[in-house]
Image (cartoon, rainbow, N blue to C red):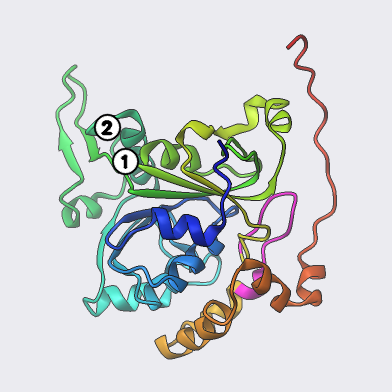
Amino acid sequence: MTKLTSLSEAVSKYVSDGDIVYAAGFTHLIPFAAGHEIIRQDKKNLTLARATPDLIYDQMVAAGCARKVIFSYMGNPGVGSLRIVRSFIEQGKLEWEEYSHFGMITRLQAGASGLPFLPMNQTGATDLERVNSNIKRIPDPYGGRDVIVVPALNPDVAIVHAQRADENGNAHLWGIIGEQKEAAFAAQKVIVTAEEIVDESVIRSDPNRTMIPGIVVSAVCHVPFACHPSYAQGYYDRDNEFYLAWDKVSESVESVKAWLDEWVYGVKDREEYWQKLGSDAHERLKVPQRMSEPINYGKY
């Protein structure tokens, strides 16, 4: 039975007000299209968890979707602060929990493993221990130095973007791999968006690239260009101009809401958004072909 559905249907069915939502992806494969659909559907009181919130959470916070953010590094990559998220936190309008990068991944690993917590080595981020009561030190039961422990993170919904997937949600990812696998296995429900929907035989032809197995996927959606302004390795480039421009847009909630009115509420889906960007942007973000070498899996 196919799990293929539209993104609007997947968000409507699997994302509820008050959920913990984890939008996965590191540097590339960031699921902006799903974030925009959540905004369009006016989801509220969400806890937005993500190792690097990126612009996607600046936009969702400005749209009024969030009551809390759980994160490690927070910023507009290569530019500066996430102005909206930071200002909401400073004004007491947004709850927050901060971890190191490794702390966030360890929380997901614990959730994916069905454990209540996991230990990790001490880090230099001792200030985080003072402001986040979830980060604790416990004695090493084998007599070594104390270890840091963090609680499991089990999102209600994880959203993962992949380069390609079949109709059952088995998904291939390549390029920079972030926390997609851990988030998917830790979550209660998983929405996969994909640049391409391919036959199952394509997925089976390269099983080692199947980062997300269909068994954990609730819905799979065909959403080309879903990552913009982020990128999808082999499909389109990162829109650095957009990241620079966002620093100016995000100087006020009013200008962000004007942007949302035009680019989120003003378009019905990602296809209309992509066409609105225009041919100049399409050409600028094109990437040349650079194929990997074939792999011989031998007898099947």
Q: Which residue is mark 2?
A: 118
Which x, y percent locates residue 96?
Answer: 26, 63
The residue stretch that appears in magenta: 230-242
Determine the residue positioned at 48% across, 72% down. Answer: 80
How many marks are shown on the rendered structure?
A: 2
Residue 206 falls in image quadrant: top right
Label 1 crowding class (10 Å Cα cut-off): few <14, some 14-19, many 20+? many
Secondary structure of the residue carrying tag 1 is: helix
Determine the residue positioned at 69% across, 50% down. Answer: 233
Counting residues from the start of the chain, the first of labels 2 and 1 encountered is 1
Q: Is residue 197 above or below residue 277?
A: above
Which x, y percent locates residue 171?
Answer: 60, 38
Answer yes or no: is residue 261 visible.
yes
Residue 33 falls in image quadrant: bottom right
Determine the residue positioned at 60% across, 78% down. Answer: 267
Asked if disc 2 and disc 1 are in contact, CB closer than 8 Å, the reply is yes
